[in-house]
């Protein structure tokens, strides 16, 4: 998995997230499943070829912790977000998304819908 660093203008100023890119079916299916913890400024970004509600949906089965989920459109703008609870069956964005960011739950309140993720590395 490739590491990507994003700068996000959040509610409390700029926030830097280091995300591992997941683009294959296997990487996206397993995501953070089985991990024991997640760093507050870490996580993963699930990449799809186009914007979709169904393809951007996630499950939380076999997860050991809750996560903050941000759905981004093709311009890396947040179109929806949710605080996903472990073992929940299904979460999907309200509008089509191309990227799904899964990160620490403490980040949830820091990034509003409408914020833009800027790739810096």
Image: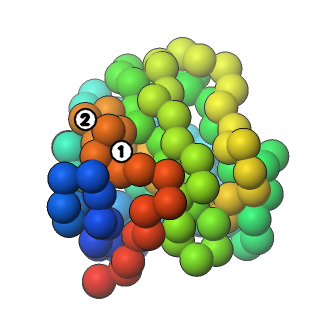
Position of 109 with respect to 27 (left or right) is: left
Could you say where residue 44 lies in the image, as x and y percent from the top left? 41, 54
Residue position for label 1:
103
Position of 19 with respect to 78 (left or right) is: left
Could you say where residue 114 lies in the image, as x and y percent from the top left? 50, 60
Residue at (48, 20) in percent of width and height = 85
In space, the residues marked 2 and 1 are separated at their CA atoms by: 8 Å
Could you say where residue 19 lies in the image, as x and y percent from the top left? 34, 61
Give the quarter of the image for residue 23: bottom right
Position of 16 with respect to 57 (left or right) is: left
Mark nearer the viewer, 2 or 1: 2
Depicted 90 relative to depicted 70: above or below: above
Residue at (39, 24) in percent of width and height = 66
- Per the image, label 2 sits on a secondary structure element best described as helix
Q: Is residue 34 visible?
A: no
Residue at (36, 45) in percent of width and height = 103
Could you say where residue 33 lies in the image, as x and y percent from the top left? 46, 33
Depicted 8 relative to depicted 112: above or below: below
- Per the image, label 1 sits on a secondary structure element best described as strand
Residue position for label 2:
106
Residue farthest along the top direction in this orientation:
87
Depicted 81 relative to depicted 90: above or below: below
Position of 102 with respect to 100 (left or right) is: left
- Position of the C terminus, as image quadrant, is bottom left
């Amino acid at each position: 998995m490739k590491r990507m660093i994003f700068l996000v203008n959040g509610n409390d100023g700029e926030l830097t997230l280091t995300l591992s890119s997941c683009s294959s079916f296997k990487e996206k299916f397993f995501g953070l499943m089985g991990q024991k913890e997640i760093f507050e400024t870490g996580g993963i970004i699930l990449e799809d070829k186009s914007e979709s509600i169904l393809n951007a949906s996630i499950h939380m089965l076999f997860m050991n912790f809750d996560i903050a989920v941000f759905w981004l459109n093709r311009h890396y703008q947040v179109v929806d977000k949710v605080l996903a609870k472990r073992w929940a069956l299904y979460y999907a964005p309200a509008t089509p998304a191309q990227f799904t960011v899964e990160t620490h739950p403490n980040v949830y309140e820091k990034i509003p819908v409408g914020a833009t993720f800027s790739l810096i590395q």
